[in-house]
């Protein structure tokens, strides 16, 4: 099984910029404002909180969802 190449590490997600392939409620650009670590193992990232640039609305998702290139692009496009 091949894994997609990604140029980012889950522990360095804070303040990274992301573009939604399909806009969410007419919002396309997001910033990671919070990284949540596993309660039992502080070395493992569990979730990230994204903030929409325009509305400042927050939502949380599992960090690995950002690796899905059909939903997210790294950086702002």
Image (tube, helix red, strand yellow):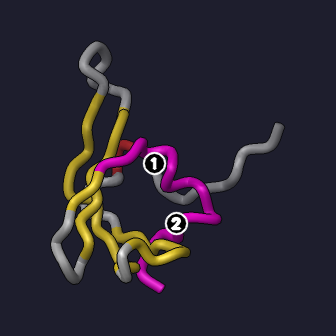
Magenta residues (range)? 60-77
Residue drawn at (22%, 83%) of the image: 54
Q: Position of residue 47 (x, y in %)?
A: 34, 40
- When asked about the image quadrant of residue 6, the answer is bottom right
Reply above or below: 53 against 33: below
Q: Which residue is drawn at the image coordinates 54% and 74% (left, top)?
A: 21
Give the image location of residue 65, x and y in percent: 51, 49
Q: Which residue is mark 2?
A: 72
Image spot of residue 66 (x, y percent):
49, 55
Please say if 47 is above or below 53: above
Q: Secondary structure at mark 2?
A: strand
Quick check: 35 above or below 40?
A: below
- Is 74 in the magenta? yes
Looking at the image, the residue that sits furthest to the left is 56
The tag earlier along the polypeptide, 2 or 1, is 1
The residue labelled by disc 1 is 9
């Amino acid at each position: 099984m091949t894994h997609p190449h990604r140029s980012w590490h889950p522990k360095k997600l804070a303040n990274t910029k992301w573009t939604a392939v399909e806009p969410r409620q007419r919002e396309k650009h997001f910033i990671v404002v919070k990284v949540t670590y596993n309660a039992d193992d502080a070395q493992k990232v569990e979730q990230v909180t994204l903030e929409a640039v325009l509305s400042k609305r927050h939502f949380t998702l599992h960090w690995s969802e950002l690796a899905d290139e059909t939903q997210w692009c790294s950086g702002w496009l």
